[in-house]
Amino acid sequence: MLRFDREVLLITGGAGGIGSAAAHYFLERGARVAIADTDATKLEQVRRDLRAYGDRLFGIEVTVAHPDGANRIVHAAVSKFRTLSVLINNAAVVRDNLALRMPAEQFDEVIATNLSGAFYCAKAAVPHMIRGGGGRVINMISASAIAGNPGQSNYAAAKGGLLAMTLTWSKEWAKYGITVNAVIPAAWTGMSEQIPERVLLGVFGEDKVREMRSRKPSQVAPLLGYLVSPAARDVTGQCLSIAGRRLSVWGYGKPVLEMESRDERWDEEEIAERIEAMGPPWQHPGPSVL
C-alpha cells in the first residue's frame, strides 16, 4: 500500500461521493486532508464517517465560487496543517438545460463554481506549494469537456475551460516542481442521480445505464493516488479517465489530419474537394456522454 504521510491535501467538493472517497483513501494511507464543501449536513456526515482518523481530517463549509471563499479554504488548511502539497479541484454543480432554454443564472452559477472556483483555489494554494518545493494540482473534469453533451452548455464549457487551464498551468508551474493533470472520473454519484431516469435510458439504453451505476467513487481514488505519488513526478499536462475497471489516457491538441494546398493559398472549392475526399462523416462529435 502506498503511503502519503508527508502529504497535505485540500479537496474541494469533499463531502460528495468522489471527494469523500478520495479523502478516505488518502487518510487511510497517512495523509492529512482538508475538505471543503457547501453542504453542511454532508460535511458533518463525512466527519463522522472518518472520525477514526482524528485531527488528520479537517472540514470547512464554504463555497469556492468567490475568491474570498477560496482564500478562506486555503488559509484554514494551511493554518491547520502548516503546509499544503496537493490540491484536488473537485467542487462542481450541475444545472442542465438545453442552450436555448438555459437562463443566464444557470450558466453563470456553473461557471462560477466549476471553472472560476478552481482558478481561485489554485491561485491561493500554489504559492504555498512553491514555498514547500513542489506539489500536485489535480483538476476533475468530464468527458463532456471534450465530446460535448446535450443540455450541458454550462457544464461542458466549465470543464473544457478547466482542461485548458490544466494545460496552461502545467507549463507555468513546471519550473516549481508542480505537476498539473486532469482526471475524468466516471463514477455514479449524487450528481449522477440528478439526471432523470428517462433521459439516461433514452440516451444510453438500459445496459449502459446499468454499467454506469456500477462504477463506484472509490474506484477513482487510486488514479488520484498515482498522480500524487513519486511515480508520477514527471507526469504533467495530461488527461486521464477512470471508469470502473477501465483506465484511459486521452490525447488532444494535435490535428487528426493535415493537408497542403496545391497552390499558394487555399480557395473554397479546393477545401470542399479535399474535405469531401475524406468521406462522410469527416468529423463526428461522438455519442452523448455522462
Image: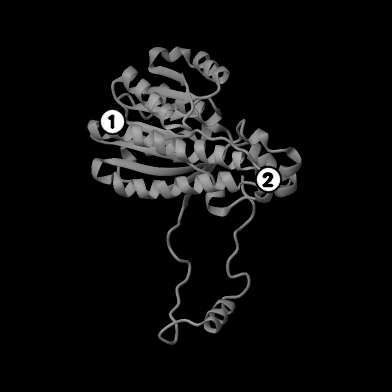
Q: Secondary structure at mark 1?
A: helix
The answer to whether residue 146 of the structure is visible from this angle is: yes
Q: How is the image coloured?
A: one colour
x, y (%) of residue 134?
Answer: 26, 36
| Residue holding disc 1 | 128
Q: Secondary structure at mark 2?
A: helix
Q: Is residue 50 above or below residue 164?
A: above
Q: Is residue 272 above or below residue 254?
A: below
| Residue holding disc 2 | 208
Q: Is residue 55 above or below residue 252?
A: above
The answer to whether residue 244 of the structure is visible from this angle is: no
Ranked by sequence position, the earlier of labels 1 and 2 is 1
Q: Specify few, some or many for label 2: CA neighbours under 10 Å numbering under 14, 14-19, or 20 or more.
A: few
x, y (%) of residue 157?
Answer: 53, 48
Q: Residue at x 50, y 33 (%)?
A: 91
Q: Residue at x 55, y 40 (%)?
A: 108
Q: How many tags in the picture?
A: 2
Judge from the rendering whether residue 65 lies leftward or rightward of residue 179; answer left or right. right
Q: Residue at x 49, y 15 (%)?
A: 47
Q: Quadrant of the N terminus?
A: top left
| Residues at marks 1 and 2, CA–CA distance in whole angstroms | 43 Å
